[in-house]
Amino acid sequence: MTVSRRALLAAGAGGAAGAAPVVSAAADGRRAGCQAAAAGRSVRVRTGFERLAADGYRLLEGQRVGVITNQSGITSDARGVVDVMHADRRVRVTAVFGAEHGYRGTPQAGLSEGDYADPSTGLPVHDTYRKSGRALAELFAKAGVDTLVYDSQDAGARFYTCIWTLYDCMVAAATAGKRFVVLDRPNPASGRDALGPVLDRAHSTFIGRAPIAQAHGMTVAELALLYNGEFVPEAAGRAVELAVVEMSGWRRADFFDATGLPWVPPSPNMATPDTALVYSGTGMFEGTNMSEGRGTVRPFEMLGAEGLDGAWARAANAADLPGVHFREAYYVPTFGPFQGRTVGGLHIHVHDRYAYDPVRTGIALLVTAKRTWSGFAWRPDRFIDKLTGSTRVRTMIDAGADTETVVGSWREELMAFRAVRRRYLRYD
């Protein structure tokens, strides 16, 4: 560790300005790299949790700790972080907080597990889903915790709700006067760049609270730093007292399979890292009357509708999108749209992850689906506007705009977000 406990506590005590102590990964990463080279093996990423535990949980000393996590909060040998912390006398975990899909990850989208006692540890599990602001602050106060620790795997897309649970909990912690610690994990789609439209505040919802890009290209710790520097003070009247524990061994260009870490689906339909790779683009199909692949073994990689045929895959391949091609596909979803019925459409195959742009690809698929299939329609509730952060994508595609015109429409706002984002990046 390159930041002493005294320095961490001193920085935290001066947190009125919102500055966050950061447990740096640079020296730790160099040591890990040398050790890995000497052992003749590839470098493995150490998560924020592993680095916190290796330091004896000194950052949490004397605190009653509440952990915000789910089934993806695991160690490198696939043990749950709550189970590990609960069994260690050096840290005092007194409560667990679950979000959408719950602490154990059992429900489908839009559901949670409610409140209960965890059968493994006996700890109380509190449901945060659909709670924010004062109600969430009161929940933290009632739980009697001093510090909230966040450790959950993200999928890299603005409309993935775990990052807005992070935001809501930071706002609530600031309101309730609680400390907040974020343990970092990799962005599975890499952190090379931000892509896509930036949220218009007029379309703020639980799948997008604040103006960030659709594919943000950040880790959860970097997002927490950005939130605390740009948005939490506006929502809570002050910044939260924040510390982040960085990973070691992670580089911005790394995809999840380069980390050596086990993948646990952070939600039921985020099946693999390949799902996360395409999700920030194909997640937009939840705003249409088409199947986004739920009820298959390849959600968000297989898309279609009853009555579609190979014409869509041919049109998508004709668009000559970088890094990806499309296979004509047919499937029968076991649940969700078109449950039990044969769906025709396509299967996305990414053959060059570095050239692939998930948001551009998603827009191209929307454009070609509308031109190919006469039955194409947006959901009546205009959910597409919530997913994309404005009315622009829907109205431009309806007006006949091509892919390049739609993608070009957010160039300036994306450049502005990239400039803000750059101030909060913590990895090479």
Image (cartoon, rainbow, N blue to C red):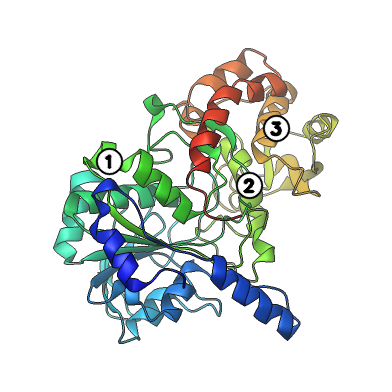
Secondary element type, mark 3: helix
Mark toward the start of the polypeptide (1 vs 3): 1
Mark toward the start of the polypeptide (2 vs 3): 2
Q: What residue appears at the point 54 percent right and 42 percent down from the top-left corner?
A: 216
Secondary element type, mark 2: loop
Give the crowd class for mark 3: few <14, some 14-19, many >=20 residues within 10 Å.
many
Secondary element type, mark 1: helix
Could you say which is closer to the camera, residue 190 or residue 112?
A: 190
Q: Position of residue 59 (x, y in %)?
A: 33, 71
Q: What amino acid is at disc 2? A: Phe
Q: What residue appears at the point 30 percent right and 73 percent down from the top-left corner?
A: 60
State which mark lies toward you, 2 or 1. 1
Q: Is residue 297 visible?
A: no
Q: What amino acid is at disc 1? A: Pro
Residue 233 disc label: 1
Could you say which is closer to the camera, residue 143 or residue 108?
A: 143
Q: What amino acid is at disc 3? A: Leu
Could you say which is closer to the camera, residue 72 or residue 413?
A: 413
Report how far apart the C-alphas of labels 2 and 1 lie in the structure: 35 Å
Q: Is residue 428 left or right of residue 42?
A: left
For this orientation, the residue located farthest to the top is: 399
Mark toward the start of the polypeptide (2 vs 1): 1
Residue marked by disc 2: 300
Q: Position of residue 256 (x, y in %)?
A: 64, 61
Residue 365 disc label: 3
